[in-house]
Image (tube, rainbow, N blue to C red):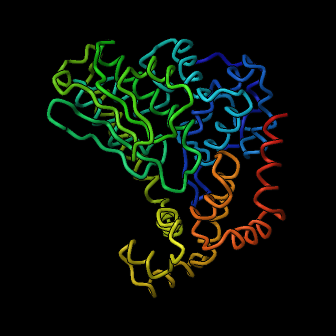
Amino acid sequence: MLERTASDTKFGSLLTGEDREAHLIRARELVGLPHYCAMLKIPLSPFLKQYQLSNIPAQPPLGSYIRLDDFCRLLDALATRARRETFSLDWTKWLIEKTPDPLDCQGADDTVCMAASYAPDLRSAIDVLASFASVSHDLAMAECVSEGATTALQWAFPPSISCRNQITDRIAGAYCRKLSMLAGDTDLVVSVELNRDRPVDAGPYREFFGPNISFNAPFNRIRVKTSALETPNPRANNDIFCALNELNRRRLADKRRAHTLVERTCEAIAAGLDDPDLTLSKVSRKMALSERGLQRRLSEEGATFQMLHDKVRRKAAEDLLTASDLSISDIAYRLGFKAVGNFTRAARRWFDRSPKEYRKDRQAAAQW
């Protein structure tokens, strides 16, 4: 664990799950970021305030979370400010060098990585990482798939998370390091596929992940040698392994109980956002509910389909205008608008300015 400094004491705004519509990531992911930004001479406080991450304690308690989309946008903004497309990858490498016990992965209170550390063998460790991944960060999918000579740990972020380049680098880097250390730094990883844009310079990614690295994949996947999965873990401790898995099961159950219908509806809308004719009827079919039933249950939670559709569109517009180089017309298409003029009118209602003006203002804010 990194040492605490005076600069940590006013770090972040703690979220313990009361925002039931938000996708979450554990607050411990922020540990070390003030030190790293200070090393790069980046003033972190204004960014934390901008993305509502003020006043988090230096050592957030177990089970505390922050909003995943806020964290993703924070990382993208810092990468832009640092002029480093490898910002999160470099930060992960720096954390690896500074962490006293490299098997600690992402922090001593990460019960998922801790359980993997005490697993009887590598196969069990990968199963734990896949089965309980959502304890640490919300995912749309996480699984371990055997493919003959290789076995894949694969995962995907929720469709509503638009800024995923930096968060993908962060999580994939941590997973690869964890697997490498559990295997005794042997040549375990066969290939890595990342659900992120291809970087301008892929060299640092080949250096970290290996030569068989690819981008723009439909989801994230780390392939390892199946033949190595039965290798016994010298740190194995069945009592600790079982106790941690029970704790992870309880933590995962607690998070799933907080997964509301509103959140599920927002996910379904985000998955079909580019459909210009997206309707309540289409979304209800995706969710295996009747149109009337979904409408009634949303009403009971104080929401409507139109309200949620507009909310998801607005958030996606913020992310794409801030963190992508897509043209205004391409963004309008991705948001399901039939004409750019319709998108412009919506942006003026959301942001009190045009999409072009909003992008210019956000880019200027990131450069100071």
Residue 366 rendering spot, x and y as whole percentages: 78, 38
Q: Is residue 151 left or right of residue 362?
A: left
From the viewer's perspective, is residue 56 above or below residue 90?
below
Residue positioned most to the bottom: 292
- Residue at the image position 16 percent from the left and 29 percent from the top: 149
From the viewer's perspective, is residue 97 above or below residue 42?
above
Q: Is residue 279 left or right of residue 34?
A: left
Residue 146 rendering spot, x and y as whole percentages: 19, 38
- Residue at the image position 22 percent from the left and 29 percent from the top: 123
**Nearer the observer, 230 or 347:** 347
Number of marks in the rendered image: 0
Quadrant containing the C terminus is: top right
From the viewer's perspective, is residue 141 above or below residue 296?
above
- Residue at the image position 70 percent from the left and 34 percent from the top: 80
Q: Is residue 222 left or right of residue 134?
A: left
- Residue at the image position 52 percent from the left and 78 percent from the top: 277
Residue 308 rendering spot, x and y as whole percentages: 60, 71
Quadrant containing the N terminus is: top right
**Nearer the observer, 137 or 308:** 308
